[in-house]
Image (tube, grey):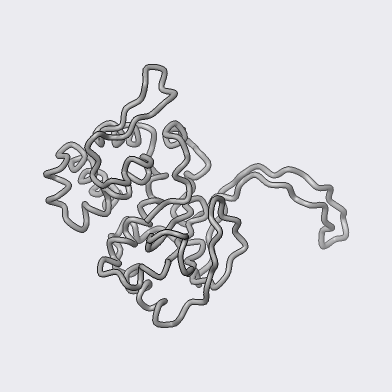
Amino acid sequence: MKCLLTSIPLIMLLIPGFALACLENQIYVREHQVAPYVRVDQTPVSGYRRNGYCRDLDIENYFQDNSSQKIKGSSLKLKKWSEAEKKIVQSHIDKLPKWLGRYRFGEVLRAETDGTRNPAATVPYTKTIIFFDPFFKSKNQRDILIHEVSHIAVWDLDVSAAEEFAAVSGWSTNENQTKRFPPTNPIKADSVKSVTEDFANHIEIYYSNEGILRKHNPKAHEFIRKLVLQKENP
């Protein structure tokens, strides 16, 4: 399981209004060049650079067999969904915790593998989840989905909440805050990759086995408990 933005530094997570902070039913469209075009009334429009913005999601059929997205650092070979696979994934989407279930997806894609044993991956800024072959052989599919949606949810944390989570989980920085250091006792081995991966692991374990999280790190458990309570009762 991974987020395809794990290289983003911690400071990006803590900047208010960062590009990924769109509403649950929106995706972020990055800054891009708009080619010259002609309006319906035949008025010519010159090309221009459009700033990034949040766009409402109106796609109801998020299961897609292909995508125009260019996913950095990944050469995925997408494949066609089977109806049986759609039903399996949708059944878990329908049973997501209430606050995670509010997120709408831009695309839900199917691929053989990302070159690892990962069962799924997420592109947060487009609210895209990619399911690989190992997912359908897994016995903890619900946990996997919760983990992936948490990669989207983490970007809704405000600055103070992001700082608090990083602190209670064990992340630290040097004096001038130019370098970050992962927890010395992470909840999962891959939590050291990034704060976002660490957050997704915490949410996953909170729902799969809360007792493990409470015992491993009482402060982190209390943070997640309060966060979930707040999100479930906005």
Quarter of the N terminus within the rendering: bottom left
Q: Position of residue 183 (x, y in %)?
A: 27, 35
Front-lying residue, 86 or 96 = 86
Residue 150 percent location from the top left of the image: 35, 52
Q: Is residue 114 left or right of residue 142?
A: right
Depth order, front residue of 199/156:
199
- Residue at 25% x, 34% y is 184
Residue depicted at x 47% and y 46%: 5
Q: Residue at x 57, y 70 (%)?
A: 66
Q: Is residue 74 left or right of residue 118?
A: right
The residue furthest bottom is 83
Q: Measured along the vertical axis of the image, is residue 134 above or below residue 218?
A: below
Compared across the picture, whether 219 is left or right of 66 comes to left
Number of marks present in the image shown? 0
| Residue at image point 44% right, 44% down | 6
224, above or below 123, in the image: above
Judge by depth and name the residue closer to the eye, 66 or 23: 66
Rendering coords of residue 205 (x, y %)? 22, 53
**Residue situated furthest top in the rendering:** 175
Residue 42 located left or right of residue 206: right
Q: x, y (%) of residue 211? A: 12, 51
